[in-house]
Image (cartoon, rainbow, N blue to C red):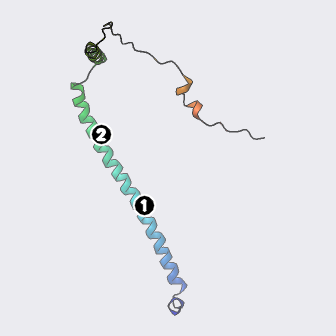
Amino acid sequence: MDKFANVGWPEMLLMALIGFVLVFVVLVLLIYIMKGMGWFFARERKAKVAASAEHADDHAISDQELAAAIITALKLYKSNLHDQESEMLTINRITRAYSPWNSKIHGLTQVPERK
């Protein structure tokens, strides 16, 4: 107990102040390190996207080619089945009408009324 009796208030306050300042400085330093890492990785990602976009234009598949590939695959699959059915395949593009099942507004919780 005698070792703690010799410590004065000015020394304790100075140590507490140094501790608070040190924690604050480290937190600010961590913020700037995280921002720098975010900037670095965002720049790297943008470079990869730009490089892949140049190569994607060369190998782009149109919707008609994709539909033709699907129809060909289905025709080849159907020709290997035992039962012969009609060989006419049709792919129609359907625009989805509004449905309350996929509406996000219905998933929100309503605020109860206060009485």
Report the residue marked by disc 1: 28
From mark 2 to mark 1, how far is it between C-alphas? Answer: 27 Å
Q: Is residue 88 above or below residue 21?
A: above
Regarding mark 1 in the picture, which secondary structure is present there? helix
State the image coordinates of residue 14 (x, y, percent, origin top left): 49, 79
Question: In the image, is residue 15 above or below residue 93?
Answer: below
Picture coordinates of residue 38 (x, y %)? 35, 49
| Quarter residue 107 falls in | top right
- Residue positioned 54% across, 31% down in the render: 104
**Residue 9 position by quadrant:** bottom right
At x 37% / y 54%, what residue is drawn? 34
Q: Nearer the viewer, residue 62 or 12?
A: 62
**Residue sticking out furthest to the right:** 115
Left/right placement of residue 90 relative to residue 6 reads: left
Query: Could you say which is closer to the camera, residue 79 or residue 67?
Result: 79
Query: What kind of residue is marked 2?
Result: Lys
Q: Position of residue 71 (x, y in %)?
A: 29, 14
Q: Quadrant of the C terminus?
A: top right
Mark toward the start of the polypeptide (2 vs 1): 1
State the residue position of label 2.
Answer: 46
